[in-house]
Amino acid sequence: MFGFHKCTAKKSRTVRGIVTSGYEQPAIPDTATCIRLMDEYGMLENIRHHSLVVAQIADALIVELLDDPVWAPERALVLAGALLHDIAKTPCLDGNCDHAAAGGDICRKHEYPEVAEIVEQHVILKDHDPDRYNSGRFTAMEIVYYADKRVRHNQVVSLEERLEYIIDHYGNDDPELHCLIRENFQRCRELEQALFRVLPFNAEALEQRIRFPQLPDKVLNNPWA
Ligand SMILES: [Fe+2]
């Protein structure tokens, strides 16, 4: 019932319990590898904490969408995409690079092309497809894109609260940019409405659905090991 759009899906398969993708090489880093990449790219602790909460939220969504093992976005892919979505945020803090594009480059360099797509599109999705959303099919990219918009720093918030923060901090007092940001959030609202039409809980209850244990104070350690 749920899962990848048939036109864009790369058929997934499971080999010895390790979820792989349509690519020849293993394309999904496990959590320990994601944490190592955070170290390698000097991810600031606050960004790391944000990424861990986004991963919790994304996982809370994906476990409910796994009814159909054929078309469901792989849980491991969603988790890796969420953990790495801001992998280039720290080096791009000076404003000299686009952290989504740079993060995609990092993931491709490490031969994780599917994760790269998620990272590249976590700010703005290339494909906005309400008809597909309304048929109950979602991609890993959409899950991470949505999860990221529900987390401000390391707090789970509503889309409206996140929008307000983005406008304040990244809007540059530029009406045209504000308009683009609002347009992006409007698309995200449509995705949210479709998601919570099929999920057995509502958007406000998302935080209560987190399945991972509480994060340790020192998020440098792998909290799920
Ligand atoms: Fe983020």
Image (tube, rainbow, N blue to C red):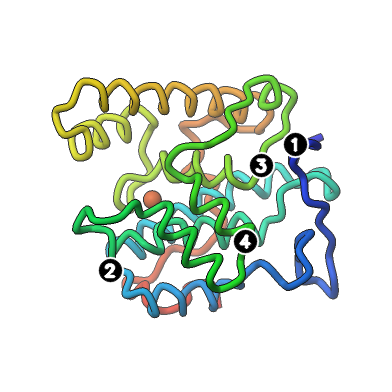
Badge 3 crowding class, 10 Å Cα cut-off, few under 14, some 14 to 19, many 20 or more, is many
Counting residues from the N terminus, which is met first, the one under dot 4 or under dot 1? 1
Counting residues from the N terminus, which is met first, the one under dot 3 or under dot 2? 2
Residue at the (37%, 74%) spot, across then down: 41
> Residue 199: image x %, image y %?
65, 33
Identity of the amino acid at label 3?
A: Thr
In which quadrant of the rendered image does the C terminus lie? Answer: bottom right
Badge 2 crowding class, 10 Å Cα cut-off, few under 14, some 14 to 19, many 20 or more, is some
Identity of the amino acid at label 4?
A: Pro
At mark 2, the secondary structure is loop
Which numbered tag is attached to residue 113? 4
> Residue 193: image x %, image y %?
56, 23
Q: Which residue is mark 1?
A: 5
Q: CA–CA distance between discs 4 and 2? A: 24 Å
Q: Which residue is mark 2?
A: 44
Q: Closer to the observer: label 4 or label 3?
A: 4
Asked if residue 66 lies left or right of residue 108, the reply is right
Q: Which residue is mark 3?
A: 139
